[in-house]
Every structure is written in C-alpha cells, then in structure tokens.
Amino acid sequence: EGGTSSGVSNQILHTEGGEMEPETMETKSLTEYFSQLHMGSVMGKL
Amino acid sequence: FPIPAVNHIRMEASCLELALEGERLCKMADYHAGVSFFEAAIQVGTEDLQILSAIYSQLGNAYFHLHDYTKALEFHHHDLTLTRTVGDQLGEAKASGNLGNTLKVLGRFDEAVLCCQRHLDIVMDLFDKVGQARALYNFGNVYHAKGKSICWSGAEPGEFPEEVMTALGKAAEYYQANLSIVKDLGDRAAQGRTYGNLGNTHYLLGNFRNAVASHEQRLQIAKEFGDRSAERRANCNLGNAYIFLGEFEVAAEHYKRTLQLARLLKDRAVEAQACYSLGNTYTLLQDYERAIDYHLKHLIIAQELNDRIGEGRACWSLGNAHTALGNHDQAMHFAEKHLEISKETGDRSGELTARM
C-alpha cells in the first residue's frame, strides 16, 4: 500500500480525515401507522 | 355516552393531528416547526403507546438534525424506555440505533457501542436483514469516530497509535460486513454511503489505494442517483487520497470537480475549501502562479465569510508562494497579514511561524 508522499502533511491539507456520509436515523412513521389504523377500521366494517 | 369518553376521543384525534403535522414539517426539513408540533402533541397527550413512541422518536431525530444532541438523547431515551416497557422489540431496536448514533456524536463511544450491539442483537433475532445492515453501518461509524477522536494530534494517516488503528480496523470490518448484506439486498444507496465511509477509514489507516477504490465506487453510485452532494464529497475524498499517493495531477482534477460542484450547490464554505486544496496541490506541483490564483480565491471567500482562521491560512500560503517566485514585497505583505491574524486569533504556532 502506498505510503505518505514526502512533504505532504495534514497541516497542508486540513482534511480532518475526509468527509463522512450522513448517519442513518431509524424512523417511526405516523403516516404509515395512521394508514394502518384507518385500513383496520375499514376492514373491520367489511 | 359519558362525556369523558368523548373528550378522550377528541384528545387522541388532536394529538395525532398535531403529530402528523410535525411529521410533515420534518419531512420538509423544517425541524424547528416540526418540534413545536410534536411538543404540542405531547402536551395534549395520548394513550396510544405506538403514537407516543413515534413522537418521541421523531422528536429525537428532529433535535438530532438541529444539532441539539442533549435533547435528542433525552427523547431517544424516552423512546427506549417506552418500547422496553411495552415489549416492542422492533421499536426498541430502532430506539437503540438512534440512541447509539446520538451517543456517538456526543463522543460517548462505549455507551454507543452497547446501543449498537442491542440494535444488532434484536434485528438478528427478528431475522431482519435490512435492520442488520443498518446496525452494522452504525457500528462502523462509532468505531470510525472513536478512532478519529483519539488520533488528531498532528500525526499523518497510517501513522496513528495502535489504539486508533484498532478502532479504525474494527470500523472497516463492520463496513465490510454491512456491504456484504446491502449488496445481497441490492440496496445501491446504502452501498454508496458505506463505500464513502469505508474509503475514509482506509485513508486514515494509510491504505490509500483501497481508499481510492472505495471512493471510486461511491462516486459511481452518487452519479447513478444524481446526488450532487455525494459526488462532491467523493471527489474531495479522492483528491485527498491521490495527494498521499503522490499523484498530484490526478488530485487536482478531483479538486477541480469538487470546486465545480461546490459552485453548483452554492456552498461558499466548501468552495473555499476546494480553492485551498487546489492552491496547496499546485504548490506541490511547483506551479506557483496557479497556486496564488487559488489561494487568492480562497482568501476572498474567507473574508466574505468572516473566517479569520481561513484568511490567516490563505495569507500564509500566499506568502510562501510569492517567496518561491521571488516576489519579496508581496511575500512580506502576506506574511505581515498572517502575523496580524495569528495574533488576533490567538494562533501561537501561526504567530511563531509568521515571525520566522
């Protein structure tokens, strides 16, 4: 694997280790829950 | 009918309506307004614990996006307690995942690891492959952040203490485990995210060829989705890796693409960073005229953004480039500017360098 090239330091680059991808947060959707509730009540009437 | 029963139905309807509006606003990234509606929904109250769990969870996420991590922690913790109390396994897994992400940002890595493990254990019990992949990605992020939190003391990638390299090694393992699942699932968006972070991990480990390979994958996937922000990130990260491989011309091409995309996305801070990287790359290529051109561009944006530290860096770089070209008056002018800014910002090492 390639080593660091001479004369290059993080002082020159200021990269701070690269740009990260966003975190993936878990979601609990009320819209979906509401649709399920609604479907449940419709199905209950059938 | 007894009146309390009618009131109860009204209360439930009102709580759900408020919460649904909060959800709609958060989907549009209006987190401040979303928080207000969710808080109002909690004030009204509900006896439906699924609704309450969703409100806690979304409030936690809204505060997370607003960078109020203490509040985010509070609501994800409420959600965890609630889901555990009612025995909602999937809900607990999700709450643990969100709590882990929040603890990671707060630098509480050991607690974050426990949350990630709980998230992973539950989704494995439930044979939930998507959940497993997500938990493994979070795990990777925690170890990556842990490694990075210890290592930033001026050392170069690949030359950090053993503790750092161990944490980064674990991060790479979790990202690889995640990749094998998301590839099976055919989830290209998830692959893109993981390749990006795996690339950064290889970079810190000093495995620059592997970093390039991962960031190339990330770049390709970003293009598939037309995701300009991800494309910009990948180009910037590729530029950094090629610098360490000593391939400065290739690095410059990636930084130029980064600059184009930053302009397209109208992100002045990122545009400034790209100009700075290009200035430094042309310095490495000993093309000082071009280096000066980009450092001046950086300086103008830093002044516009009132970024005194950036301005100081630009002056320092301009002083060096002018010295290399034998423009002594210009070199002295920027060295004096650098000294003035270093004094103002309390940058002692900058001040000492400037005096030299």
Image (cartoon, coloured by chain):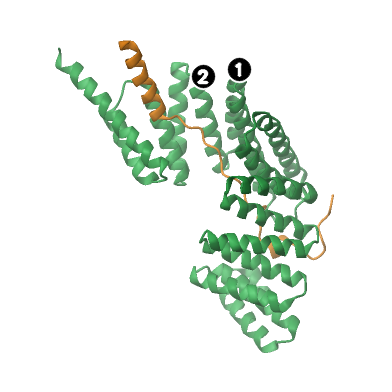
Chain colours: A orange, B green
Give the structural element (helix, strand or loop) at label 1.
helix
Query: Mark 1–mark 2 contact, CB under 8 Å?
Result: yes
- The amino acid beneath tag 1 is Asp
Q: Position of residue B216 (x, y in %)?
A: 71, 49
- Give the alpha-carbon distance from disc 1 to disc 2, as whole Å: 10 Å
Q: Relative to B204, say whether A41 is above or below.
A: above
> Front-most of B221 and B238?
B221
Disc marking residue B125: 1
Is B239 located above or below residue A33 in the figure?
A: below
User: Which dot marks residue B89?
Assistant: 2
Q: Residues within 10 Å of mark 2 (few under 14, many from 20)?
A: some
Give the mark, 1 or 2, whose residue is nearer the N terminus: 2
Residue nearest the viewer, comparing B198 with B345: B198
Residue A6 horizontal/vertical position (percent): 82, 63
In terms of image quadrants, where is residue B146?
A: top right
Q: Position of residue B275 (x, y in %)?
A: 62, 68
Q: Which residue shows up at 56% across the image and 44% down it?
A: A22
**Amino acid type, label 2:** Gln
Tag 2 secondary structure: helix
Horizontal side of residue B139 vs B24, given as left or right = right
Furthest-front residue in view? A46
Q: Quadrant of the N terminus of chain B?
A: top left
Q: Residue at x 57, y 78 (%)?
A: B340
Quarter location, residue B191: top right
Asked if residue B266 shows in the view, the reply is yes
